[in-house]
Image (cartoon, rainbow, N blue to C red):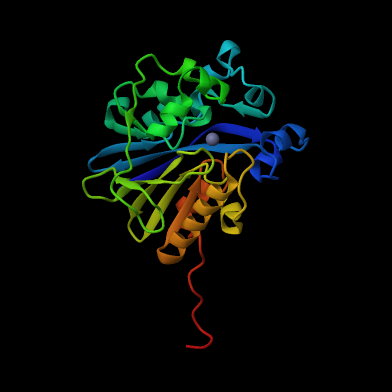
Amino acid sequence: MRVHAIRTGSVRIKTAQVEGRGHGLASIFADRDWSDWLPTFAWAIEHEEGVIVVDTGQAGHLLNGHGHSLHPFFRWEVYFRVEPEEEIGPQLRSLGIGPRDVKRVVLTHLHMDHDAGLVHFPHSEILAAPGEIDAASGLMGMIRGYLPQRWPNWFNPVRLELDDGPFGPFTASKRLTRMGDVVAIATPGHTADHLSVLVEDGDATLFLAGDTSYNEALMLAGKVDGVGPNAKVSAATLSAIRHLAEKRPTIYLPTHDPESAVRLAARQLATAPLELGGAA
Ligand SMILES: [Zn+2]
C-alpha cells in the first residue's frame, strides 16, 4: 500500500476561522487578519483492492465567474488559487493512476475545496455521509455555502452509512476494504456529518482528517475552528483523536496543515512516543 499526499492549490482564510472565537461566522466577518496561504490536500491510497481517493481538492472551474458561491462567506472570507496542473486528475496521472484505476472516492465533507475535483472521477463510486449529502443539496445547501449547482451532472453519491459500530473512541465507523485496513469514522464538528478515513499502514495509523482541525497543534490543544455548528461536538471529536493517538501510533493529516505531507513522508506521529530512560 502507498498513500500519496496531493496538494491541489492553496487557500487563505481568516484567523478567526482557523481558531474559533465563540461567535460563529460573525467573528470571521469581523476579523481583519488572514492566515498564510495554506495547502489543500487530497489523498490517494494505492490499495490492492483498488485505488481509494479521499477528498478531491480544489479545481479551477469553481473559481471562475458564475461558479463562485453566492454565499457571502465564500465571496469575501476565503481566497483559493489552483493551477490546472495542480488539480487532482493531472497529478494522479503523473503518478501513473488513471481515472478508471480509482475504484472509490470518499468525501470527508462536501465543501468546495473537497469536492471540486470530483469532475476528474466520472467512473468512480463516490461515497459521502448521508447527512452531509442532505445538508449540501438543493437551495438550503446553497444557502449553507455548498455548491450543489456545480456538481457534475452525473454526481449521484452512495450514501455511506457508518453502521459497523464504534471504532476505538469514535462512535460510528464503516470498513472501506475487505481487509478492514481502511475505515471511515464519524468525526462531527467542522460539519455535523463530517467523516475521516483511517488507514492501517504498516506500523502506524494514517488519520486522513479532512477539516477536523486546520493543523495538528490545534487538535492537540483542543482548539476548535470558527465554522463548526457546535463547539462541544467539535471539541469531543478532537478529544477522541487525541485518545486514539495515545492508544496507537497515529500520523495526523488534516487537509490544510502545511506540515501534513512532511509528516506523512517522515512518519511523524501525533503524540511523541513515550520517553525511555528515567525511572524504569
Ligand atoms: Zn470544510
Q: Where is residue 16 in the image (x, y as percent from the top left)?
A: 70, 41
Q: Which of 160 and 90 is in front in this view?
A: 160
Q: Quadrant of ligand 1?
A: top right
Q: Could you tell me how many numbered marks the image carries?
A: 0
Report whether 1 appears left or right of 30.
left
Q: Where is residue 199 in the image (x, y as percent from the top left)?
A: 35, 50
* Residue 78 visible from this viewpoint: yes
Q: Which residue is drawn at 42% across and 62% down?
A: 249
Q: Position of residue 185 (x, y in %)?
A: 38, 47
Q: Where is residue 205 in the image (x, y as percent from the top left)?
A: 38, 56
Report whether 160 appears left or right of 189.
left
Report whether 8 appears left or right of 31.
left
Q: Which of 218 and 5 is in front in this view?
A: 218
* Residue 35 visible from this viewpoint: no
Q: Residue furthest bottom?
A: 279
Image: 118 above or below 250: above
Report whether 30 appears left or right of 69.
right
Quadrant for residue 12, please give it: top right
Q: Which residue is drawn at 46% across and 51% down?
A: 264
Q: Which residue lies furthest to the top in this view?
A: 66
Image: 185 above or below 161: below
Quadrant for residue 144, please give it: top right
Image: 212 above or below 273: above
